[in-house]
Image (cartoon, rainbow, N blue to C red):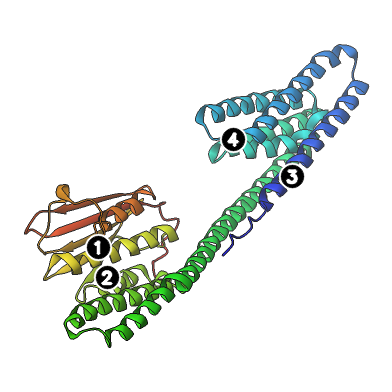
Amino acid sequence: MPAAAPRPDTSSRIDGRIDAVVHSGFAVLMVASAVRYVMRHSPADNLWTVALAAAVCALYTVTALLAHRRQPGERRHQLWLAWMIALVAAWAALVVVAPSFAWCSFAIFFLTRTAFRGPAAYVAGGATVAATAVGLFRMSEWTDVAMLLGPLAAGAMLTLIYDKVERGQEQLAVSEREAGIAAERERVSREIHDTVTQGLASSLLLLEAAQRSWPDAANPDVRKATDVLRRNLADTRSLVHELSAPGLEAAPLPEALEHAARQYVDAIRVQVTGDPRLLPSEVRHALLRVTQSAAANIKLHASADHASVTLGYLPDAVTLDVFDDGRGFDPAALPSPSEKGGYGLRAMRQRVEQLGGELSVESAPGEGTIIAAQLPVSPPASSSKEAL
């Protein structure tokens, strides 16, 4: 199947157009404001104000270019923030001294919201708005309160609108990522169904047909091979079903973990500690796969009488412990992967570590086994329960 053509980055194109409009507007308004100021003030007043306006233009140009070209890296980001702080300070001085330049505050405000995050964004944006309000109030000779309150009210409204747009973009990004995951799961399920599943089914039919013509002495081995192939076919079809219509992914997590574990260990139960909450889809999927793999190992190797799964919710993490009282083993003496197996624990550890988590194995011959995983998650924004 040919790979899907990459979708154009619509969000980046829109952001680029908005930036172009903001920067162009800043340039036009700065020129218009400078002309207005020069025409209304004496040359002695013009010199230092125009010089400060030129410095603001230079700082704006540098910060806009850094914003457009910036790449990951703490040093580069700190350099950009330093230029932004200098720009806000110079702009505040300019608009207080010469309120004619107040119209350019919009571009400065949007640039500060692009540069800063969290409280720093509110401080930088607030400084821009406050300087504009003071400058306009000064222009009215400290008599027109509307000149003071107008910019403050406009700044508050712009802040609320900007925050709402930002939250919408974040939610859209999450939705697009989850849609991409679902589409990829569907594609993989089709590939497995059209290749591996069909091949296993054909091989099973051929082996069952050949069994009727082979010597009786070979029948026990053929029956074993047929049984193994039939189980592999069933597992593959189950995998295809989970990928294409993942019912386990939609169920409450404790219920999904118990269902996944009971595919291999009938009497296993899931205990929950902490306050259940919604988890990111990738974390949830990793917990499901680790539980399935650990339960499969219990069935194949442990000869355990009892087994349990404990799911724990911490403020900034989620934990999973799978215990069995079986024969145990020496984790340090784990053999290298081969055609006989040995991939399970390594796959679990790799899956957990890819999400920034940790997986540990506590076991000893004759003393059972505990597989413990811990994955980081963001602290809960509310008290939403894991029942959705």
Q: Looking at the image, is mark 3 or mark 4 nearer the viewer?
A: 3
Q: Nearer the viewer, mark 2 or mark 3?
A: 2
Q: Is residue 333 left or right of residue 109?
A: left
Q: Position of residue 97 (x, y in %)?
A: 77, 22
Q: Which residue is mark 2?
A: 261
Give the CA distance from mark 2 to mark 4. 51 Å
Residue depicted at x 26% and y 59%: 339
Packing grade of label 3 (10 A; few <14, some 14-19, many >=20) is few
Instruction: Decide which of tag 3 and tag 4 comes sooner along the chain.
Output: 3
Which residue is under mark 3?
18
Q: Amino acid at mark 3?
A: Ile
Disc on the earlier residue, 2 or 1: 2
Q: Say which residue appears at 30% left-offset and 61% top-offset.
A: 290
Q: Amino acid at mark 2?
A: Ala
Q: Secondary structure at mark 2?
A: helix
Viewer-nearest residue: 364 or 34: 364
Whole-angstrom CA distance, mark 3 to mark 1, is: 51 Å
- Mark 4 residue crowding within 10 angstroms, few (<14) / some (14–19) / many (20+): some
Question: Mark 4 or mark 1: which is in front?
Answer: 1
Secondary structure state at the residue bearing disc 4: helix
In the rendered structure, are the residues bearing label 2 and label 1 in contact, judged by CB atoms less than 8 Å apart? yes
Total numbered badges shown on the rendered structure:
4
The image quadrant where one finds the N terminus is bottom right
Secondary structure beneath dot 1 equals helix
Q: CA distance from mark 3 to mark 4?
A: 23 Å
Q: Which image quarter is the C terminus in? A: bottom left
Q: Can you give x and y, in whole percent of width and height, for residue 209 in the image? A: 33, 86
Identify the mark nearer the N-term, 2 or 4: 4
> Relative to 117, is 90 on the left or the right?
right
Q: Does residue 82 appear in this view?
A: yes
